[in-house]
Image: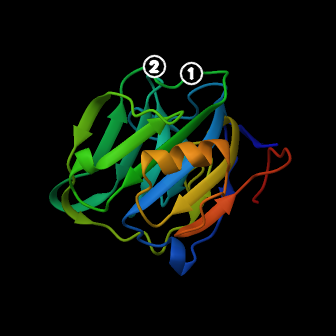
Amino acid sequence: MSRDFDGVDDLINCASGASLDNQEPLSFLAWIFPDTVGENPFGGVRGMVTCKGTGAGFVFLALNNTNALTFVKDYVGGGSVNLARISSNETIVLGKWQHVAGTWDGSATATNVRLYINGVEPSYQITTDGVGTKESDAAENFNIGNNAAATGTFDGLIAHVHFYDRVLSRNEILQLLRYPASISRNLIGYWPLWGASKEGEY
């Protein structure tokens, strides 16, 4: 009971309702079964688990070249630096189900981004504060399994995607790992992704 992404061009377009726009704080959660680290849209970032935007205002949770979990928020302006937090290498296991989550309080301080893999916060190899101005993502759709340009396709299965407009605690993440959609407070999107599909939008 999940959706299968082909690592080439698949995506689930969840559109861009006002409740999904410019959320800070936020929490993303999903069950994933990656076959590979996925397609490479830019730099070392590869298969997108969730992504709001492409080149404008983007905020995403993704895998990278070294089997790490990555959270990035787009900052613009002179000398801008994107907010980024990347787990240590090999924290994601290919060919196995695992639960991933990212929470962010909306600040430019990267240590306020927390990642979780199977309910455990990993060590981090990159923690980069945002510099400049957060760019609006209001004009961008929220996508599962890819970015809006379909250049960062996830390769494998995704299920039980949650989007909250607050920072979840570790205990809440552990509860949702076991019982999806069991916490309704500030839940602004839940996509169980029943069935199996390789093409089109959900």
Task: For label 1, count other residues whose C-alpha is less than 10 Å away and answer few (under 14), some (14-19) or many (20+).
Answer: some
Q: Residue at x 65, y 57 (%)?
A: 182
- On screen, residue 36 above or below 184: above
Choose top left, top right, bottom left or bottom right for residue 131: bottom left
* Percent coordinates x, y for residue 50 in the rendering: 55, 51
- The answer to whether residue 189 is left or right of residue 77 is right
Q: Residue at x 77, y 43 (%)?
A: 2
Q: Residue at x 82, y 50 (%)?
A: 194
Residue labelled with disc 2:
90
Mark 2 and 1 residues: CB-CB less than 8 Å, in contact? yes
Q: Which amino acid type is shown beneath numbered disc 2?
A: Glu
Asked whether the viewer can see residue 85, the reply is yes
Choose top left, top right, bottom left or bottom right for residue 132: bottom left
* Percent coordinates x, y for residue 180 in the rendering: 67, 51
- On screen, residue 139 above or below 124: below
Asked whether the viewer can see residue 151, the reply is no
Q: How many marks?
A: 2
* Percent coordinates x, y for residue 199 in the rendering: 79, 49
Residue labelled with disc 1:
93
* Camera-nearest residue between 161 and 67: 161
